[in-house]
Every structure is written in structure tokens, then in C-alpha cells.
Amino acid sequence: MQYNWLICAALLCLQLLTAAPAAAEEQESLAAQASNLLSYIAADYADAVRDGAVIDQPLYRQQQRNLNRALEMMHGLPDRPGRAALEKSVRDLDGAIAAKRSGEQVRRRANAAADRLAQLYQLQRSPAEMLPAASVAAPLYQKRCAACHGARGEGASGPALTDYRRMASFSLYDLYNILDPGADTVHARRLDADLSSRQRWALAVTVASLAVTGTEPPPVDEARRYPALVGLPGMATARPVELSPDAAAALMWWRGHPQRVRALQHPLARADGLLQLAESAYRAGDNASAYHQMVLALREGYLPQRDALAQRDQPLETQLSARWQALRSAILGDASNAEVIAAFQQLRSGLAQARTRLQPPPASDFRGWVTLLFAVSVVLGLLLWLRRRRR
């Protein structure tokens, strides 16, 4: 009897251990599908309604069906703090669609709901590694996608991927999510069921590049104006349509040519982006990925700048070294969730200070000193001239 009890207990523990990851995977799939449907609404609603009137009835009905399906999927997700606000935003979106509001209003509401859903259920919206070049997945695109979307994205039975306006409505993650078999509501599973995560990211880059084929890269100065868009996670999560025209055009090109953009990103910005990914992974319960991203942030972002920071501000460099070690110990040790999140935030705050300290003096300051010295020299010259006149 004792042995039977031990066997039953062991089997019950095994069942609980295997059920938990499966339940988490199912929840992530539901959240990703709902996010996918909201992204389609944001991108396509404007083609169905114009000036308060429906101009494409089948497409309009499709938007309504997409929203209803998204709501059904959300009802299958566990309750969390912030869930009520999320549901209210989706109901407001439903009301906007029913009232035939403008395409911009619906787009903003749909994207806001998709972003809130991703944050609430900790969807990983940025790749763990650097984005590959568009050429990496070009053969895969020809094999899997060209029949519907055209060899150059010009469109066939499926929509054109060269439509700049429509493609600007999607983030790179939205394109990746469309290719995820756990979230895909459009393609047949034969198209994406066997794709790895890295292949889907590569295909997303390939698809994103089609809308900017043949266009010139943005000026290098744009990387300094919009540093958050040059690297991850910004390049993966930002939607060009929501940015200013200059930033949108830059992001459209950058995300289609990530291999040519890496040199434009400041190493400390790279470190901060990786720490964002690490914190997201930790909040989702993936400590191994969080630790991996933290180490990448240290090696690829901070260490190349450490000596320069030590020369400019030794106390800050010493403080940051201690914060890196504190975060490492917190992730690997028995620290509480609150302590680990606080360690992330303290380190990122210190990196922001370090980046400010490493900035060269503003050119305006230099010009000011030159102007002052010139004025002093003029005054001295005038005094000497007056002195000679008196003599």
C-alpha cells in the first residue's frame, strides 16, 4: 500500500509538471492569436470604411469577425491585473468599428489593444539574437510565399507586400506573428508549421525589405535622432505608421536591412535593449533566457565602453560594475521577483547616466567659447589701439 501511494504521488507530480508548461504555451498561443487579429484590423480597416461609410462590405464584415474572434480568445486567458482595462479598450474598439469611425482612430485603438495584450501576457516580441539579413530567407520566401504574394512582393492571389502604406501598419513582430503557426489565422499550417523562430524572424525581415526595395538608406544622422529604432527591441516592436514621417521612413529601411544598421547603434543602447529583453524574459518566468540576454548585454554593449567610462567617470564605472554583479546574483540566486526587477531598473538607469557621460561636449558649447574668446581679443585689441593713440 505504501509503495502504491508513493507511485500515485509521483505520477501526480509528473502530471502537474507537464501540465504547467502546456497550459502556459496554450495561453501564449491564444494571446498571440488575438494580437494577430488586432493587427489585421489596424492594417485593413481603412480599406473598408471611408468618411463614415462602408466602401467594402465583405472586408468590413471580416474586421467585425476578427474582433469577435479576438474577444473569444481573450476570454480564454487567465485574469490578471489590468485585464479589465484591456477588455474596455477592446470594447471601445468594437464601438468604433460599429460607428464606422475613421481608419486612423480604429488603427490607433487596435494597435493600443494589441500592445496592451502583449504586455499583460508577456509575449516575447523581439528576437533573442541579432536580426539576420533579408537575403537569408529569400530562398524560403520564394518557396513558401511567392505563389500568393508574388516573386517580388507585387501581389498575386494574396495582398501586395510592396504596398508601403499597408506594410507601415505592421511592426516587424506583427509580421513574425503572422508566420507563427500557434498564432497564424490566415495561412495554412503547411506554410509555417515547420518554421523555427529564427526562420520566421528572417522571413519577417525579408517581407519588410520588399516595401523599400531600391530606396536609398536614410542619413546616418537619423540614427542619432532616433536611437531607440536602430536596435532591438525598438526595431522589432515599433510600427512606422505611428511615427513621424522621417522616423517612419528610417525604420522602414532599417528593419529591411538590419545587417547594415548594427554599426549605427551605440553599444550602451545595445546593452539597454538586451536588458529590456532580459527583463521581459524574466517576467515571463524564463530565467535561463534572462540570464543569457543579460550576459550578452554585458559583453556586447557595456564592456566595449567600460574603459572609456572609467577615464571619464571612475565612480560611475565602479557603481555600474557592482550593479552588473548584483543583477547576476539576483537572477541566479534566491532573490524575490521585486528585487530582481529593481536590479534591472537600477542597472538600466546607470547605463543611461553612462551614455550621457560619454557624449562629446555639445558643439554649441564649443562655439560659445570661441565667440567669447573672439570678443575678448577684439576688446583687448581696441584697448591697445586706444592706448597707442593717446601716446
Image (cartoon, rainbow, N blue to C red):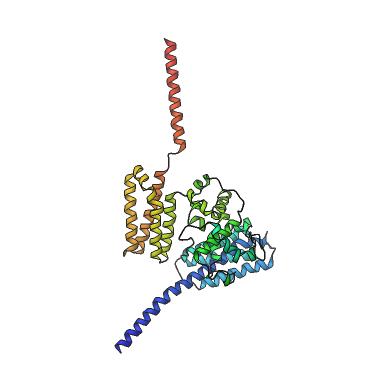
The answer to which image quadrant residue 147 occupies is bottom right
Where's residue 166, x and y in %?
A: 62, 58
- Furthest toward the bottom, the residue is 1
Where's residue 134, x and y in %?
A: 55, 57
The answer to which image quadrant residue 94 occupies is bottom right
Where's residue 127, x and y in %?
A: 48, 61
What count of labels does the image hold?
0
- Relative to 254, say whether 95 is above or below: below
329 to the left or right of 389: left
296 to the left or right of 85: left
59 to the left or right of 332: right
The residue lying toward the viewer, choosing from 40 and 178, is 178
Q: Is residue 388 visible?
A: yes
The residue lying toward the viewer, choosing from 28 and 133, is 133
- Furthest toward the right, the residue is 55
Q: Is residue 91 visible?
A: no
188 to the left or right of 300: right
Where's residue 283, x and y in %?
A: 41, 64
Residue at (38, 57) in percent of width and height: 295
Name the quadrant of the N terminus: bottom left
The residue lying toward the viewer, choosing from 362 and 104, is 362
Residue at (36, 61) in percent of width and height: 340
- Furthest toward the left, the residue is 2
Name the quadrant of the C terminus: top left
- Furthest toward the top, the residue is 391
The answer to which image quadrant residue 148 occupies is bottom right
